[in-house]
Amino acid sequence: MPGSIYTYSFPTRIRFGPGARHQLAQVLADLGVTRSLIVTDRDVVKLPWFEPIAAGLKNAATFSGVWGNPVLSQVEAGLAALRACGADGIVAIGGGAPVDVAKAIALMVHHPGQLFDYEDGKPDARPVDQPVLPIVALPTTAGTGSEVGRSAVISDDQTHAKKIIFDPQLLPQVVLADPKLLLGLPASITAATGMDALTHLVEAFLAKGFNPLCDGIALEGIHLVAQHLRDSVRFARRRAAGESVDTEAHLTARGGMLNAAMMGAIAFQKGLGVTHSCAHALSTVCDTHHGLANGVMLPAAMRFNLAAAPDAFLRMARVVEPGATSGVAFIDWILALRAEIGIPATLADLGVSPEQVDRLVAVALDDGCHPLNPRPVAKPDFYAIYRDAFAA
């Protein structure tokens, strides 16, 4: 992989490989973009490789007012920045938050009303029937895969409730997936975003419904996580400690995780499940990082699901442990992976209080992900899953 750049589409055109970011100016020109707004977060804008990217674009402005779980006020500030500079295209650089904010900005340039008027599933939602500005995405984490997704997840500033804006027009036109942009990612963020990608893949594979294309993508994505997440975290730790790192091996690991994250986002068009409902509640009630919330909740959710889909669990187990004879081996593998990469073992380790469980259950029960879970989830089940996540 190092040294090569490949092109593939699902359906977004993806240019993958070390140095892919250098194609940005030409890609924008090919899309007819004459003035671009770079949407990024307040940490990415400080990284040494960011300024050369921005300097390589003519007539570009930068909006870096994104941090944490993206909220409506960030979208509104970014929209004001875009209108001030007169941009006709957006470059999204960062993890899922800047990409989702970029999608929302691109939508609202030519659509009336407020962003949440377009919430997916809202009975009186406004239609997405006007042009959406073109987006080119440069992912800097391997987690949400938002760069190949059709939705943006934006929270309400006051209630922290997550709102999903969905339309195929929100897909970025081009993704420049350059693993070099991930080489400096801290171990903790590498681990949390990696668990996010894994959770997407697992829940997509288990989701109700018939979609063998997504199932195949999900299984290969799980294989890539098994091959590359530990190495990505290990290399990040060694870099932080000032130790020498094999750059080619590090690029291979980061590239594997970039692909796994995109595959997770492609696969979960089939659906997600109870892990995400529990994690969304943690982000809403406790402002927990989404990937970290998924990582903490995944084993408890999978223990709940195992009896409902033993054959599916065995298939996943054999992807990561070819000699596995039971789906329990897959849950054991998740636990070992999680411990090795430094994901907290319990909700208590995250600072969540048992007194918050009532609120967590109420939010999770109302979440739109669990109806496609392989095992139906009622209110008492959510209490049981959260109790399990406090225990181990």
Image (cartoon, grey):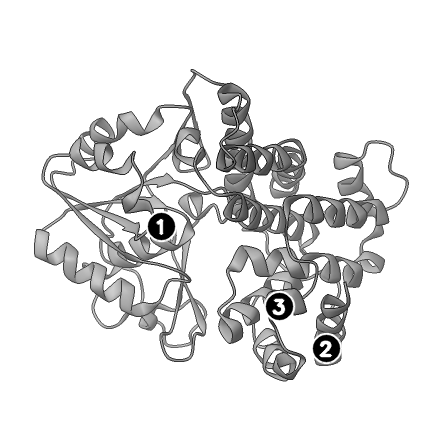
Q: Earlier in the sequence, mark 2 or mark 3?
A: 3
Residues at marks 2 and 1, CA–CA distance in whole angstroms: 33 Å
Taking 146 as reference, is 22 above or below it?
above
Is residue 41 shown left or right of residue 239? left
Amino acid at dot 1: Val
Label placed on residue 383: 2
* Residue 41 seen from this side: yes
Q: Which of marks 2 and 1 is nearer the N terminus?
A: 1
Is residue 175 shown left or right of residue 65? right
Q: Where is residue 284 shown, x and y percent of the image? A: 50, 72
Q: Where is residue 202 shown, x and y percent of the image? A: 67, 49
The residue beneath circle 1 is: 99
Viewport quadrant of the C terminus = bottom right
Q: Where is residue 113 shown, x and y percent of the image? A: 23, 72
Q: Residue at x 80, y 48 (%)?
A: 332
Q: How crowded is mark 2: few (under 14 residues within 10 Å), some or many (20 or more)?
A: some
Label placed on residue 278: 3
Amino acid at dot 3: Cys
* Residue 312 seen from this side: no
Q: Residues within 10 Å of mark 3 (few under 14, many from 20)?
A: many
